[in-house]
Image (tube, rainbow, N blue to C red):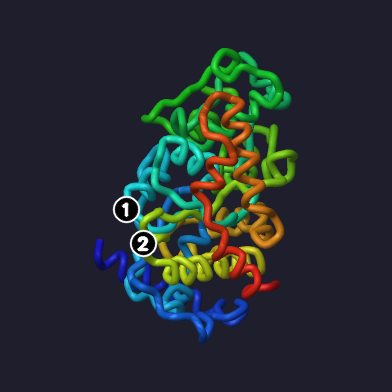
Amino acid sequence: MSMMQTRRRFLCSAALAGGACMLPCLGARAADPGPETTTIRLGKTSAICTMPQMIPQQLLEAEGFTDIRFVDGPSGNPAEQLARGDVDLMVGYASNFILGLDKGEALTLLAGVHVGCFVLFGHEGVHGIAGLKGKTVGVPGLGTGPALLLTLMAAEVGLDPKKDIRWIADPTAKPKDLFIEGQIDAFLSFPPEPQELRSRQIGRVIFDTAVDRPWSQYFCCMLAGNREFVRRHPVATKRAMRAILKATDLCAAEPARAARLLVDGGFTPSYDYALQTLKDVPYDRWREYDAEDTIRFWTLRMRDAGIIKSTPQKVIAENTDWRFLDELKRELKS
């Protein structure tokens, strides 16, 4: 494992060196103090839309971090991993973070990262989200990001998600495989699954959160930090955020280079699917969209659906810190 991590680190550093020249500025600002800690632990998931947290190796080194770790996430809700302190910062689904905050988990929301990674696929006979009534729908597990989002989508069009949809959450089988085999009618996919299904011409797109309203108007994935880490290490938090947001810019401006970084780093095997993900997912919205509006949007819908009890005001007042984002928007002007 140590050898694999060393090789991954070398490959990431070497690959990013080729793309670093096009970034706004590789290193930190001269006036910035050094980070309180030189160790940073970032989340690693199978959802490659979160790649800005997986490719910024050299950018983090330029920010003063010398011990950079990518920690595998558990199944279910990876936000729990962040709350426990197993990782320091994580890019993840906004709905998962809000669900964790409603349970009292120690997270701080820091920034929006990108829009629209989820795509709803269905077989013939499924027409629109309302057409899911009485159909079998596969999810990785109840309470996961796809299940939460599809619950909200169904409620938005007047369905009762508990009564009208037959949920299939088999821990021994992937929803994508069940869909390909024709054992379920629909499933909500996330990268690289949509790219694979489109490439193989399997199923049809029912709804795409990258382009279909209202979901396309708000962040899908956001950046959050362990609350204690953010409190104790504000300089390190800002420096790590700067590296991740620069990596987000790289995803938007040079998708081919970013995809190569992801593959060379051992995070995903398919360059073609990684590249298509970068072309499909809007990574150029983190300056434009309002992160606080996203929290308000998700929290209201999750509360209306009976998933959480917290109000948007409570979540925003107690669990967000936008000061680093505001500073970085000024520093990293496009």
Residue 242, above or below 100:
below
Residue 126, above or below 106:
above
Residue 190 in picture, x, y percent from top left = 56, 43
Q: Which residue is mark 1?
A: 86
Number of marks: 2
Q: Quadrant of residue 89?
A: bottom left
Q: Quadrant of the N terminus?
A: bottom left
Residue 66 visible in the shown view: yes
Determine the CA span between mark 2 and mark 1: 8 Å
The disc placed on residue 246 is none
Q: Quadrant of residue 25?
A: bottom right
Q: Which residue is mark 2?
A: 41
Q: Are marks 2 and 1 in contact (CB under 8 Å)?
A: yes
Secondary structure found at label 2: strand
Secondary structure found at label 1: loop
Residue 156, above or below 237:
above
Residue that protrudes farthest toward the bottom in the picture: 30
